[in-house]
């Protein structure tokens, strides 16, 4: 097995093996772009290492071979005393994990070679600074020394000299620091900083392997649902230096604006600096356009390379580059992360440029991004106290209490507070806090700083580089010069789309994308927002491509009308129990507790017209489209008085010797019906079977409402759905009763109603006997909420609070099965039931109405198992439409 690939041997399609960085370095090398030579150690080598705890036997020899070739090519040996070859060792997994893995630069420097580097570069200060950086990075990431110790020593050296920036330290100062750093390493690790270049390299490679299983990396993978067994590749690349003087520098660039998607030149450049300085946001960069003034030749070359890359990758690329004494080097490229809005704009731009087709465009956006664009924004007209302005790094409107460290962010958010994490700049140690926060605000760093990159990846609101705000994390406050002081706990609002930071809570307004879905803005209008235009186009691509229909879960006319505006083609689930809450709850209580037929009939008689009126409205709102009405399925306890309250009332009345006969009677009845497991108790079809007349009343209400609409010239398409069926016999009984009622109504009103009768599949037994059940059902709707509950034996109402966090932390699943369908378990039942049902009844209509119907990943699954439609909450309808299109594209 081959574990090492030269950059000339790989290509961009080998990401599994070479990681994203390695594959793209190879691709750029093959494109003839200026990439410093190097090689990549594969993810396979990492996997072997992680499994066995040692590197594969052949790795050492293979690395030696590639290193020798590299040395040959560069005309110098790694760490050679008079002219050292130096290399960087960088991690690079299949999926980019910003800030998660380790990088060590300047490997090969030692007491012996530092003078050689100084002589070659003609710059003593540079050589000592490089050595100082090596010990610092190596000490921190490879040897596990607390990075603060180095920072403190550096600060102390500056302080002693009375200067404020690193640049003001001279060669002698840095040489002193090197000694100090070596002392720190020796003290903290009990060993000397390794002087042997190959040992440095091997240790660094191993540290990269190990960092795959670092806590932060694991947390990030869980967040992003990246499998834990992919491993990382390691790139060994000959060093080029951006810190060799004013004609050197380093930068990050995007081929388009990753925040808005607009075309143009975007990036940050830092003169006389090494790569990590930019990403860490430690010094403030200048806009890339400045480079044109500083070094026109390199700038022009860079522009040309960017164009090459964009045309080659047919997508937005981000780039890291270094200029060493006027010579441009490409250190990295990848298809760049972007905001949701940019994703939509870029996808349509690329179609217009003829670079991609519509099907490909659909792969460039996600339902998650669309959902983000539907978030509300700050009301521009609201009075708000502006504290300052930073860079709009990741859009959204976030309001929360100011916190100044990750720990507090996590603690407060656990107790239900919304927080804004405010830092001078962030680094990977802040990841927990960033996840916990509503939004992130930093006072330093550009669009490519850690905070910006990570926040965009998480879809979290971020304003960075708000330089006028003085952040003091020790005192836990932020100061606007000459003005307000924001203390920990004060509410602030940050706008990731404009970069503005406000004091207090700013009211929010709906997003333009929602306004578009609502039909309040016309995407064809000339002055329409270009985001709206892009979304409109992508939606029409999706609608033109998808096979799945999208319906909505709605139980009132208002939701139905909205769902329809959002593109729903019917209602897949109307939960009638929602119609019985509020003041009607008492009628249901009377029905359930009725002792005599007369009492029961009276309650039913009172409910019937209310139900009918509800349905008339609903059928009108969805005229011409199917409306699936589910018969009553309450967990019974929701409709009965609380047993504890009632007991207290009875006890009090008794103590006060007040009359309490009614309460007592009620209490006895409630006791009789009290269930330990209401979710597995008297609900769904079971309720209909034991309470005479209940389902008949509901069916009558549906039928009469439909007849009324028909008479009024409408086109009602009602479907009657029976919940929680476990066996075909249950369904047959209800069906007979329902058919009788429908026939009566048809006769009485002289209309033909053609009501479809079907069932939910939400119990394992129903799924397992779906072939039989289909004999009595014209349609199935998978109730994946209950199906998940019963397949896993997880209580829907309890698990999320009780043990899911532990399950997620242990990686038992990457996401709650109540959120994304568990394909292997619940999903395989859905698949089998769909097949069995269709075998019995080829025209059986199949849908899903659990929460999964609006979840992007689940929508793809339902497409692939051949369902006819998904049904989800009205706000998720556009997301489901888009994902259904993506699944079919
Ligand atoms: C389901 O169980 O998936 C379902 C849609 O029904 P409910 O959530 O109302 O139980
Ligand atoms: Mg259910």
Image (cartoon, rainbow, N blue to C red):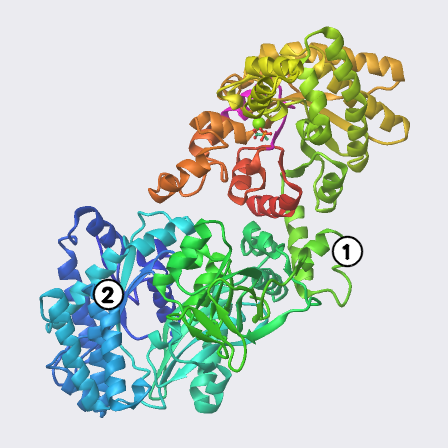
Q: Nearer the viewer, residue 461 or 840?
A: 461
Question: Does residue 154 show up?
Answer: yes
Q: Nearer the viewer, residue 642 or 679?
A: 642
Q: Which residue is labeled 1 in the image? A: 520
Whether the residue under disc 2 has CB within 8 Å of ligand 1: no
Q: Nearer the viewer, residue 242 or 646?
A: 646
Examine the rendered structure and indicate whether residue 730 appears above or below residue 209: above
* Ligand 2 falls in quadrant: top right
Query: Is 747 placed left or right of 359 in the picture?
Result: right
- On the image, the x and y values in percent for residue 878 come to 64, 47
Single out the residue that lies furthest toward the bottom: 122
Examine the rendered structure and indicate whether residue 627 appears above or below residue 697: below
Query: Is 22 placed left or right of 500 in the picture?
Result: left
Examine the rendered structure and indicate whether residue 721 appears above or below residue 439: above
Q: Nearer the viewer, residue 230 or 159?
A: 159
Which residues make up the magenta segment? 832-849
Instruction: In the rendered structure, find residue 141 and report the number of the disc placed on it.
Output: 2
The quadrant where residue 235 appears: bottom left
Q: Residue at x 80, y 35 (%)?
A: 623
Question: The residue tagged with tag 1: helix, strand or loop?
Answer: loop
Instruction: In the rendered structure, find residue 462 and report the number of the disc placed on it.
Output: none
Q: Residue at x 58, y 38 (%)?
A: 853
Local packing at callout 2 (Cα closer than 10 Å; few below 14, some 14-19, many 20+) is: many
- On the image, the x and y values in percent for residue 259 come to 55, 67
- On the image, the x and y values in percent for residue 201 come to 18, 67
Question: The residue tagged with tag 2: helix, strand or loop?
Answer: helix
Local packing at callout 1 (Cα closer than 10 Å; few below 14, some 14-19, many 20+) is: few
- Specify whether residue 740 is painted magenta: no
């Amino acid at each position: 097995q081959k574990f090492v690939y030269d950059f000339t041997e790989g290509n961009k399609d080998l990401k599994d093996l070479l990681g994203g960085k390695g594959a793209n370095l190879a691709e750029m090398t093959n494109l003839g772009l200026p990439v410093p030579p190097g090689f990549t150690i594969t993810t396979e080598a990492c996997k072997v290492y992680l499994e066995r705890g040692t590197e594969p036997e052949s790795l050492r020899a293979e690395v030696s071979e590639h290193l020798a070739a590299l040395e040959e090519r560069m005309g110098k040996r790694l760490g050679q005393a008079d002219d050292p070859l130096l290399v960087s060792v960088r991690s690079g997994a299949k999926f980019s994990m910003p800030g998660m893995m380790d990088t060590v630069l300047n490997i090969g420097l030692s007491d012996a070679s530092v003078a050689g580097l100084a002589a070659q570069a003609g710059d003593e200060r540079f050589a000592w600074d490089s050595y100082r950086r090596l010990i610092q990075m190596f000490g921190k990431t490879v040897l596990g020394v607390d990075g603060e110790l180095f920072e403190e020593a550096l600060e102390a050296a500056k302080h002693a000299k009375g200067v404020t920036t690193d640049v003001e330290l001279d060669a002698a100062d840095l040489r002193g620091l090197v000694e100090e750093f070596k002392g720190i390493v020796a003290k903290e690790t009990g060993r000397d900083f390794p002087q042997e270049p190959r040992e440095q390299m091997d240790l660094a490679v191993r540290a990269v392997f190990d960092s795959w299983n670092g806590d932060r990396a694991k947390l990030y993978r869980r967040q992003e649902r990246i499998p834990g067994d992919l491993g990382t590749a390691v790139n060994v690349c000959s060093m080029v230096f951006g810190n060799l003087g004013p004609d050197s520098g380093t930068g990050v660039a995007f081929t388009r604006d990753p925040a808005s998607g607009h075309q143009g030149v975007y990036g940050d450049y830092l003169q006389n600096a090494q790569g990590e300085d930019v990403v860490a946001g430690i010094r403030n960069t200048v806009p890339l356009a400045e480079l044109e003034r500083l070094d026109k030749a390199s700038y022009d070359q860079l522009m040309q390379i960017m164009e090459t890359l964009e045309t080659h990758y047919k997508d937005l690329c981000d780039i890291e580059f270094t200029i060493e004494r006027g010579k441009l080097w490409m250190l990295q490229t990848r298809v760049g992360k972007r905001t949701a809005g940019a994703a939509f704009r870029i996808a349509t731009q690329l179609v217009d440029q003829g670079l991609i087709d519509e099907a490909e465009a659909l792969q460039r956006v996600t339902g998650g991004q669309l959902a983000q664009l539907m978030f509300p924004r700050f009301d521009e007209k609201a009075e708000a106290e502006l504290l300052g302005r930073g860079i709009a790094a990741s859009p959204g409107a976030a309001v929360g209490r100011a916190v100044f460290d990750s720990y507090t962010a996590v603690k407060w958010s656990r107790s239900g507070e919304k927080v804004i994490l405010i830092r001078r700049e962030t680094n990977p140690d802040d990841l927990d806090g960033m996840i916990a926060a509503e939004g992130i605000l930093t006072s330093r760093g550009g669009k490519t700083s850690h905070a910006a990159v990570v926040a965009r990846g998480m879809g979290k609101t971020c304003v960075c580089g708000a330089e006028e705000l003085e952040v003091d994390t020790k005192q836990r406050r932020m100061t606007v010069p000459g003005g307000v002081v924001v203390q920990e706990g004060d509410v602030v609002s940050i706008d990731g789309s404009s970069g503005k930071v406000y004091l207090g809570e700013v009211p929010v307004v709906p997003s333009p994308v929602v306004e578009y879905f609502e039909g309040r803005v016309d995407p064809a209008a000339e002055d329409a927002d270009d985001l709206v235009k892009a979304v409109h186009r992508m939606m029409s691509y999706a609608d033109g491509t998808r096979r799945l229909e999208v319906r909505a879960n709605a139980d009132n006319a208002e939701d139905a009308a909205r769902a329809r505006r959002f593109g729903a083609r019917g209602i897949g689930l109307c939960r009638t129990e929602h119609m019985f809450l509020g003041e009607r709850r008492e009628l249901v209580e009377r029905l359930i507790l009725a002792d005599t037929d007369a009492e029961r009939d009276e309650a039913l008689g009172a409910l019937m017209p209310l139900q009918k009126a509800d349905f008339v409205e609903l059928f009108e709102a969805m005229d011409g489209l199917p409306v699936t009405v589910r018969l009553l399925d309450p967990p019974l306890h929701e409709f009965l008085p609380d047993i504890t309250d009632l007991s207290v009332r009875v006890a009090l009345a008794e103590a006060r010797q007040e009359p309490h006969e009614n309460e007592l009677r009620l209490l006895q009845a409630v006791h009789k019906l009290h269930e330990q497991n209401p979710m597995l108790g008297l609900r769904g079809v079971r309720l209909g079977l034991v309470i005479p007349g209940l389902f008949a009343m509901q069916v009558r209400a549906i039928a009469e409402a439909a007849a009324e609409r028909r008479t009024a010239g409408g086109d009602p398409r009602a479907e009657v759905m029976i919940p929680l069926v476990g066996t075909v016999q249950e369904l047959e009984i209800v069906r007979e009763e329902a058919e009788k009622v429908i026939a009566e109504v048809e006769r009485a009103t002289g209309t033909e109603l053609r009501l479809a009768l079907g069932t939910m599949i939400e119990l394992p037994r129903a799924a397992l006997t779906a072939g039989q059940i289909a004999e009595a059902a014209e349609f199935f709707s998978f109730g994946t909420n209950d199906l998940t509950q019963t397949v896993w034996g997880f209580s829907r109402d309890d698990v999320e609070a009780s043990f899911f966090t532990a399950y997620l932390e242990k990686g038992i699943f990457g996401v709650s099965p109540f959120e994304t369908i568990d394909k292997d378990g619940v999903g395989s039942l859905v698949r089998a039931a769909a097949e069995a049902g269709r075998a019995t009844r080829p025209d059986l209509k199949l849908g899903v109405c659990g929460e999964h119907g609006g979840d992007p990943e689940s929508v793809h699954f339902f497409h692939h198992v051949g369902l006819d439609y998904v049904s989800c909450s009205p706000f998720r309808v556009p997301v489901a439409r888009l994902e259904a299109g993506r699944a079919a594209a």
